[in-house]
Amino acid sequence: MSKTIRLTMAQALTRFLSRQMTEIHGKKVPIFGGVWAIFGHGNVAGIGEALYQVRDELPTFRAHNEQAMAHAAIAYAKANFRHRFMAATSSIGPGALNMVTAAALAHVNRLPVLFLPGDVFANRIPDPVLQQAEDFSDGTATVNDCFRPVSRYFDRITRPEQIIPALNRAMQVLTDPADCGPVTLSLCQDVQAEAYDYPESFFAERVWHQRRTRPDRKELAAAVAALKGAKKPLIIAGGGVLYSQAWEELAGFADCQGIPVCETQGGKSSLPDDHPLNMAAVGVTGTSAANRLAEEADVVLAIGTRLQDFTTGSWALFKNSGKTIIGLNVQPFDAGKHRALPLVADAAEGLTELGAALNGWKAPSAWTANAAKGKKEWQAEAAKVTASTNAAFPSDAQVIGAVQRAMGASVTLLNASGGLPGELHKLWQAGAPGSYHGEYGFSTMGYEIAGGLGAKMAKPDQEVVVMIGDGSYLMMNSEIATSVMLGLKLTIVLLDNRGYGCINRLQMATGGANFNNLLKDARHEILPDIDFAAHAASMGAIAEKVPSIAGLESALQKAKTNDRTTVLVIDTDPLVSTDAGGHWWDVAVPEVSARPQVNAARKAYDEKRQMQSVGD
Ligand SMILES: Cc1ncc(C[n+]2csc(CCOP(=O)(O)OP(=O)(O)O)c2C)c(N)n1
Ligand SMILES: [Mg+2]
């Protein structure tokens, strides 16, 4: 019989977490960067006491909103290219459910995070307890079952020894490049406090490494044959390129084979913006340089991408009817989408083996040269829309230009929702890999500030610049106070167009009346005039409303030397977005309406839908 140690389930869990390690640049570090916690009924006595015991090895951080703390954890994992991650624990009921949206965000973006929501008593004696929702027909159901469809692994811990297999499974999922995503261990309150004689071996230090899958020979041969027959090949770099840290392999492959590269939202910054073969953003928010190649491409090497509608132009962008897609992806579910030739492999391994097998083959030089010409044309367009202006209400693009000029390409630029992701995807000139941090898988309003905090925890020596709209700011801004409290400086640029500008534009584009998006178009007695600078300052930030683009640039220069979170507010025009580049996006327009504008939009919509290549 091996030696045992008597601990509560919660003490065993936190001790286990503190012993899990990984290696970064050859140095052993804890794989959990810490635990975010808001305590309450269902976790303060159990997990709370246990976290206190390990506070030196596994730090606990306090936040103001469970969803926000989960956002911070998720952004931390993303900024660490999924090699390190965090846990988030909540009380039962409302605290737990506040994390469900964040779980979905992590699920969509394939990002590791460990959720530890408190759950009801396993013994059910005091039921119904505070914050417990009762199910009339199922005694085993609790609100935490909402985590099931948004977790890659879900378990409810109803006996203390169950964490032994459950935590092992959790670690497998969190460190698996293909399955990676949220793990939920729903912790019954009484069981957190229950003792068990755990084997000491359970707490042995373990160093985790990510598996790098190499391609199957047959799949590789098929992909090589397809590429060798290509006249107009194109690479789409998705988030998988960054998570694999395959940027050198990508640059080497593209250069050697002469294949232009375009980037999804998740893959942006796989190559620096100024790399000659980087056509930058592809799809609905793509550059003209990327999209005209995508329209013609005969072989599309899609690397580490989910091929979501913004990338494929709602599956109408790739217009070459004889095209072949090669899906280089660690996850077979993604590798085989749209009848692609699957090439299931890690991006770096896959590119290395493809490059070796292609043995010097090069794309026709006219195709490569044509790409370079398109890039120049796009750069000229982009320079026009991002140039400085004296306008009282500048466009998002003009604000982006100001941020880029003031902050350069070395900062980490973070965004998630509203009109900004589309504009930034097209226009932000990213530098180092990972310097563009977009959450556009779920595009969750409220991600930005909390996400910025998580990114800053991962990269404390870097400037993290958060760009956010007034709508998203109002939805979730509380972690400004946490960033000040933790001494983690963010530079937040808040674009105030007095409402949900991008949805208002979408409403107009689909024939709708201006209704319920901009504040002025919503039912009101008093038109709100929100003093965002005063609001941010009340949480301890240095805050200022800037009068112009020039004012923003000089405030950003000053902000570089500020020692704490700085919020710069600028009024912007809700009606303007960048026309250059882009592609049609499928948004269903009503088939019947009393509004002639809707009927016209539906007619145009029916025509556009003809472009979709149904069936492949
Ligand atoms: C949680 C959440 N609710 C709703 C949406 C839908 N949505 C996307 S953008 C947007 C408006 C965002 O407004 P703002 O942050 O001011 O940015 P703007 O559109 O004005 O650029 C809405 C309602 C969303 N993405 N996330
Ligand atoms: Mg807005």
Image (spheres, rainbow, N blue to C red):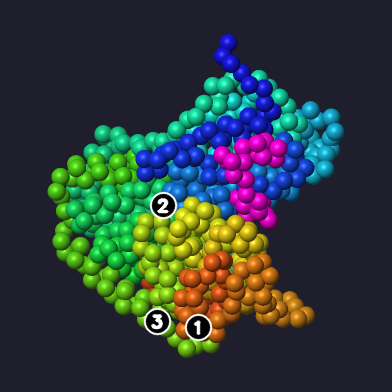
Rendered position, 88 above or below 461: above
Question: For mark 1, what is the residue?
Answer: 551
Q: What whole-number distance in Å separates the C-alpha atoms at marks 1 and 3?
A: 14 Å
Residue 470 sits above or below residue 129 on the image = below
- Mark 1 is surrounded, within 10 Å at the Cα level, by few (under 14), some (14 to 19) or many (20 or more) other residues, namely some
Q: Is residue 122 left or right of residue 334?
A: right
* In the image: residue 35, left or right of residue 345: right
- The amino acid type of the residue labelled 3 equals Ala
Packing grade of label 2 (10 A; few <14, some 14-19, many >=20) is: many
Mark 2 vs mark 1: give the one in front. 1
Secondary structure of the residue carrying tag 3 is loop
Q: Residue at x 71, y 78 (%)?
A: 528
The residue nearer to you, when weighing 294 against 180, is: 180
Question: Quadrant of the rendered structure where residue 177 is?
Answer: top left
Q: Percent position (x, y) of residue 41? A: 77, 42
Q: Which residues are magenta?
A: 48-70
Residue linked to disc 2: 239
Residue in the image at 41% along x and 56% along y? 434
What residue is drawn where x is 66% and y is 51%? Answer: 62
The disc, 1 or 3, on the residue closer to the chain's N-terminal end is 3
Mark 2 to mark 1 CA distance (whole Å): 35 Å
What residue did someone put label 3 on? 387
Q: Are marks 3 and 2 in contact (CB under 8 Å)?
A: no
- Judge the density around disc 3: few (<14), some (14-19), many (≥20) Cα neighbours within 10 Å: some
- Say which amino acid is labelled 1: Gly
Callout 2: CB less than 8 Å from ligand 1: no
